Image (tube, helix red, strand yellow):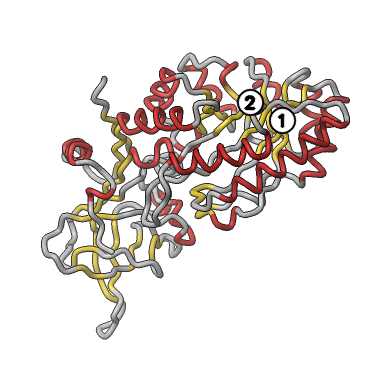
Amino acid sequence: MKINVSDYYSPEEWSIFKAESAKHETPFVVVNLDIIRQKYDELRKFFHFAKVYYAMKANPAPEVLALLRDLGSCFDIASRYELDRALSLDISPEKMSYGNTIKKVSDIKYFYEKGVRLFATDSETDLRNLAKYAPGSRVFCRILCEGSETADWPLSRKFGCHPDMAIDLLVLAKDLGLKPCGISFHVGSQQREIGAWDSAIAKVRYICDYMESVGIDLSLINMGGGFPAKYISKTNEMEVYANEITRYLNEDFGDNLPEIILEPGRSLVGEAGILVSEVVLINQKSSTGVDKWLYIDAGKFNGLAETWDESIKYPIYSEARGEDCEDFIIAGPTCDSQDIMYEYFRNPLPAYIKPGDRIYWFSCGAYTSSYASCEFNGFPPLKTYFVDSKA
């Protein structure tokens, strides 16, 4: 399938990307803050009843955080280092949650000392640490979520607990002097099956009913992230997600909705960025080989980590001459045999592409520069450049 720019960006947006890209040596990411602004406004329009807690890990750039701060967003924080960055930008701790269920005692103490009072948990050990080092805080329990296998980047195994354990933990939280306030779940990143939210919300309803019977009122549902960005595979528009999920909530909770939290990351910033790379080499492994290998100056270890297992299928585009297209195995520049982005999924490129030509990877505003933080083989982390028409 040949990629058409117009399926992803308006002529004006593409012109802005190209103008900024022309200034820099590859590889790099360009982020258009106008698109993030549009995505945030869209999310608030369709989920007007929910609070947005941006998942910082998707793109923790100060420019992105400052923009979302000014738009009124709250923030999902996963480490003390993210906390420090948020605080340095004058983001109030009252607008943060510590959403990582895996935390050191020293980190719990640090968050509490800095003023954070909303914490996620999914285990008794973590809960007892919270009671000791973040006394009186509000806690919500993350449950395991079925159906995440339909997500391109599943998140169901490492985090969360069985609903029955969540009940036990929330009862214990109250006994320990904490304030059990709700349930969280995550249906998986880049979730294209909207029904995954239906089953998760039904589980939350069951837990809330039981907790009410033992005298604990749960007033919060943290629905996590999962809303998709536009890659190769088609997705519904945000309005469709919102309409369906709102219907699920109304079916289970009626007009008496609890406080709803969303933790979008990819859906807010993914489409706002493009990764610009350059073809380094094209070759074949034998004189009779049918597969052509195309090596570029970006790879799994400097920006394209989510191509692991070919999970995220980015749209890639080149302006190389010629209408004919050809399939290539696409690999990165490092001396690691795992540094192959696409071997089985073939993303056609112009047949006459050559070393020195640029390849544009669309929808790369999330989980690219934030993953490219090491210097494997000495290749430096990706640089990111920002454009903003309202600056």
Q: Secondary structure at mark 2?
A: strand
Mark number displayed over residue 182 = 1
Depth order, front residue of 19/257: 257
Q: Quadrant of residue 60?
A: top left
In the rendered view, would you say 10 is above or below 337? above
Disc with the residue nearer the chain's start (2 vs 1): 1
Picture disc at residue 209: none
**Residue 302, image x, y percentages:** 39, 48
| Label 2, residues with CA under 10 Å away: few <14, some 14-19, many ≥20 | some
Identify which amino acid the numbered label 1 is placed on.
Gly
Residue positioned 29% across, 33% down in the render? 32
Q: Residues within 10 Å of mark 1 (few under 14, many from 20)?
A: many
Q: Is residue 259 left or right of residue 20?
A: right
Q: Is residue 96 visible?
A: yes
Name above or below for residue 184 compared with residue 86. below
Residue at the farthest bottom position? 288
Residue 357 horizontal/vertical position (percent): 18, 55
* In front of the other: 36 or 128: 36
Q: Which mark is residue 259?
A: 2
72 sits to left or right of 386: right
Give the Cα distance between marks 2 and 1.
Answer: 9 Å
Label 2 vs label 1, nearer the camera? 2
Q: Are marks 2 and 1 in contact (CB under 8 Å)?
A: yes
